[in-house]
Each structure stands twice: as C-alpha cells, then as structure tokens.
DNA sequence: CCCGTATTTCCATATTTTTGGAAATATGAA
DNA sequence: TTCATATTTCCAAAAATATGGAAATACGGG
C-alpha cells in the first residue's frame, strides 16, 4: 500500500457521515445494505449519500453489487485490513514496538477492556 | 473513544503532509524530533508545519515538549493504539470477525510481521 | 414501449481546510 | 537589555470538500 492510498482510505473514513456509513456496513455484515436504507438510517439526501459511498468505494473500503433495482453496499474487510496493516506496519521503525490494537506484548492492566 | 474523536484522529492522519510527519515521528521513536528538523525533512514552511503538528497534537496522536529553544515532537503511541482499537473494536458487529491484518481469531504476537 | 422505483451524475453553492508572509512569543546568550 | 534562534499565532487568499435540487440512468413489470 502506498502512502497516498493510505491517505485516500483515511480521508474516506475521516468524515462523520462516511464513518457512520462505513460502521453501519461493517456491522451489517457481508450481506450489506441497499443505498436507500443507508440513506434512511443516516438521514442523508440520496445524492449526498451517493457521493460519500463513492468515496468509500474508491478508497477500497466498501464494495457494491446490484440486486434488482437496488445497489447493495457492503464493507470490504480486506480493504480495511490493508489499511490497518499499513498503519501498524510502519510503526516504531520496526524496533521495539509496543503498538498494536488488540495485542500488546503484555496485556497488562491497561488494555483489559473490550 | 467517541466517534467524533475517531473522526478527529482520522482527519489528522488523512493528509499527506501530516501522515508523513506522523510516520516520521513514529519512526523517530520516543525521543522525537524538533519542529525545525521536521520542517526541513518534509520541506514545509514553518507556519504550515506548525499548523499540521497542532492538528496531530489536538487529535492526541503526538505530543510536544520543550527543550531549550526547540519544541520537540514525538509520536503518542497510546493515542495511536486507541484509534486502532476503535477501528477494530467496532468491526463485524462483534460477530464472527475475520478482520485483522494478521490474526483472524488469535491475536497472537502481532508485531512480529514483516 | 411506458411507467414507477432506486440511485446516480451534474452542477452551483456553502463550508472547511490548507498555505505561507508578517508579526508575535519564548528562550538562551552576550 | 539587546540580539539571534526557534517556533507559533494571525490572517487572508487559494484549494479542496460537502451538500442537495434537478435531470439522467438503470432496472423490472405491465
């Protein structure tokens, strides 16, 4: 993953409506949701949502499939993984790294939640 | 972490100059780098860099300390962890989650990759 | 072929973000 | 106190992004 791709993916997530949409899709699972329902749940005008979904899609974070008249959007877990990988991969200059979202070298008292 | 905090952190990283600066600091390690050197390496005007560092700092991704006349910036690994945690935490609706750059269900020794 | 539904593209406007010159602030030294 | 260095804050212009009405496109059915 190039740095510019990372910026693209981060930009896509760095907006309230898009982060909401993305998380909605992430939670909706592989089956995804039709654009209309996303718009309804997020209370967004159709063109506005369409614009945001296009951003997420272009960033490789979600994908689209047609089902009859509806366009179904679903999270692209692989794309998300690539981004997460990029963020952790370049951390700490490869040296003694204590960064990691779910598994510190020693899951001490601090990260006990979740 | 609130969704709006996540947007803040993601926005902070979603810009080429800031992502570069952040990664530079991440690789520089806990000792960090003075603003002047960051500006020089990234070839940014001082006010521009100052603006970007303030964004990263406000997002909790880096911190600042004074050393003589210099202001030293360093990555805040904890802040980064919180963001990564938020991103993974809300994925897959807590169900059968196959997301994670390297560890599907067993968050083993993550930092070992590459 | 025509109609209704679902969603997008077009596009102008509104809003937010980025940028760097000039001036201000902070620190240390002579 | 005056000077030089390091960096920030102020501010206004430039650039990028977000928003939604109107029109266009896609599909399925009658």
Image: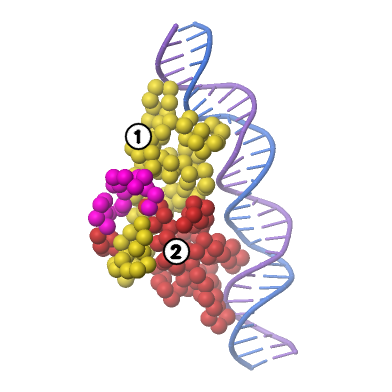
Chain colours: A yellow, B red, C blue, D purple
A27 shown above or below B39: above
| SS at circle 2 | helix
Q: Marks 1 and 2, how far apart in space?
A: 33 Å
- Can residue A43 be seen from the camera position used here? yes
The answer for which chain carries disc 1 is: A
Magenta-tinted stretch? B89-107
- Mark 2 and mark 1 in contact (Cβ < 8 Å)? no
C26 shown above or below B4: below
Q: Residue drawn at (38%, 52%), measured in percent from left and top?
A: B89
Q: Is residue B105 inside the magenta stretch? A: yes
The answer for which chain carries disc 2 is: B
Q: Position of residue B90 (x, y in %)?
A: 39, 49
Residue hosting label 1 = A31
| SS at circle 1 | loop
Q: Residue drawn at (39%, 43%), measured in percent from left and top?
A: A26
Magenta: predominant secondary structure element?
A: loop
Question: Label for residue B79?
Answer: 2
Location of residue A100 by image quarter: bottom left
Marks 1 and 2 share the same chain:
no
Return the residue nearer the eye: A2 or C21.
A2
The quadrant of the image that shows the C terminus of chain B is bottom left
């Amino acid at each position: 993953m190039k740095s510019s791709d990372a910026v693209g993916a981060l930009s896509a997530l760095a907006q309230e409506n898009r982060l909401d949409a993305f998380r909605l899709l992430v939670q909706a699972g592989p089956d995804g949701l039709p654009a209309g329902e996303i718009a309804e749940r997020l209370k967004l005008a159709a063109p506005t949502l369409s614009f945001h979904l296009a951003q997420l899609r272009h960033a490789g974070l979600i994908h689209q499939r047609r089902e009859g008249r509806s366009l179904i959007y679903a999270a692209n877990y692989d794309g998300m993984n690539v981004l997460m990988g990029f963020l952790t991969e370049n951390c700490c200059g490869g040296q003694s790294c204590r960064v990691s979202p779910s598994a510190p070298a020693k899951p001490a008292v601090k990260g006990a939640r979740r």
